[in-house]
Image (spheres, rainbow, N blue to C red):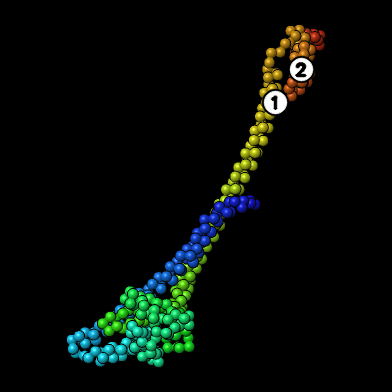
Amino acid sequence: MHIIARSDVLKIIAAPLLACILFIVTLFGLVLPVSKDNLLTQKKESIAILTQTAANILRYYNELVQSGELPDETARTMAEQQFRQLRYGSDNKDYFWITDLHPRMIMHPYRPDLEGQDLSGYADLNGKKLFMEFVHKVSQDGNGYVPYLWQWKDLPEQIVPKLSYVMLFEPWGWVIGTGVYLDDLHREFTRTSRKLIFISALILIMIFILSAIIIHQGVKETGKRIFAEQELREHNAHLDELVKHRTADLEEALSKVKLLSGFLPICASCKKIRDDKGYWNQIESYIRQHSEAEFSHSICPDCAEKLYPKFTVKQNRNEK
């Protein structure tokens, strides 16, 4: 069984792991913060458009006053009553309010106890004189946003952060406004974030699955490569060893061939051979020492006739 090196495993998992880390960092470091900022921007634009649209009611009644169709006081009262009935939002409890530039409360649907009251000293739980902030904002810019603490819609005992958009209706010197509760914004962002995180989690799971497949395939291919490299090394080692043995055998055979195929001094009479040291050896002894050949002794017919003529003649007669 082949073993994959840690460095090879790290190379395989590095890319999928880096992709997952970048995805998570992008999600929590960029996407969610940008989504929260975009949601706040959308809400700010929404309350600005709503306030500017509601101001058309005041413009309408002011035109009636300018045309002489209504007295100024009657027109203001009618506009105030219409503002008191304006509602919007998911539970239809978001509202508009009106003050003047003193500031005094002209109309507030959930705080009628403040109507007609001097609000110049009114402050929230943090000590911010919010109505003076409204007057300062519209006097300086004509409109704008002001954060503060206020009761949650029609519940005076529940104080929460709020961001309001205020604008000045200059012909009457009225400050009109509406706001968004930051807790509602936070809850809406939480719902949106959960959906985004859920979708992102599904994507991340898919990335993990694909990464696991890639890693498994990579480990498998790396294992095959390591196993093949190991087999190739063993084969090369065996081949080298085999070549060494074959070379040694060949060198030994060649050396023997050279010994027997060289120029050999031989006696013309007794047929002895002279070796490299100058000694004369019987031919069969010399060949036995320098090869694997073995000898058995006999007498050829010519030598037999020469050495044993009587025996040879008698044998020939018997054959006839």
The Cα atoms of the two marked residues, 2 and 1, are separated by 18 Å
Question: Is residue 305 something that shows in the picture?
Answer: no
* Residue 286 - label: 2
Q: Are marks 2 and 1 in contact (CB under 8 Å)?
A: no
Q: Residue at x 52, y 63 (%)?
A: 208
- Tag count in the figure? 2
Residue 204 percent coordinates (x, y): 50, 65
Q: Residue at x 76, y 12 (%)?
A: 274
Mark 2 is surrounded, within 10 Å at the Cα level, by few (under 14), some (14 to 19) or many (20 or more) other residues, namely some
Q: State left or right for residue 299 relative to residue 184.
A: right
Q: Earlier in the sequence, mark 2 or mark 1?
A: 1
On the question of residue 38 being in view, the answer is yes
Q: Position of residue 173 (x, y in %)?
A: 29, 83
The kind of residue on which mark 1 rests is Glu
Quadrant in which the C terminus is drawn: top right
Task: Identify whether 82 is placed above or below 190.
Answer: below
The residue mark sitting in front, 2 or 1, is 1
User: Residue 297 is drawn in which quadrant?
Assistant: top right
Q: Secondary structure under badge 2?
A: helix
Q: Is residue 18 left or right of residue 179?
A: right
Q: Is residue 319 above or below residue 292?
A: above
Identify the mark at residue 252; answer none if there is no mark.
1
Which residue is at the front of the view, 271 or 301? 271
Residue at 57% in and 48% down: 225
Given residues 211 and 2, the one toward you in this image is 211
Q: Judge by depth and name the residue closer to the eye, 315 or 82.
A: 82
Q: Position of residue 8 (x, y in %)?
A: 58, 51
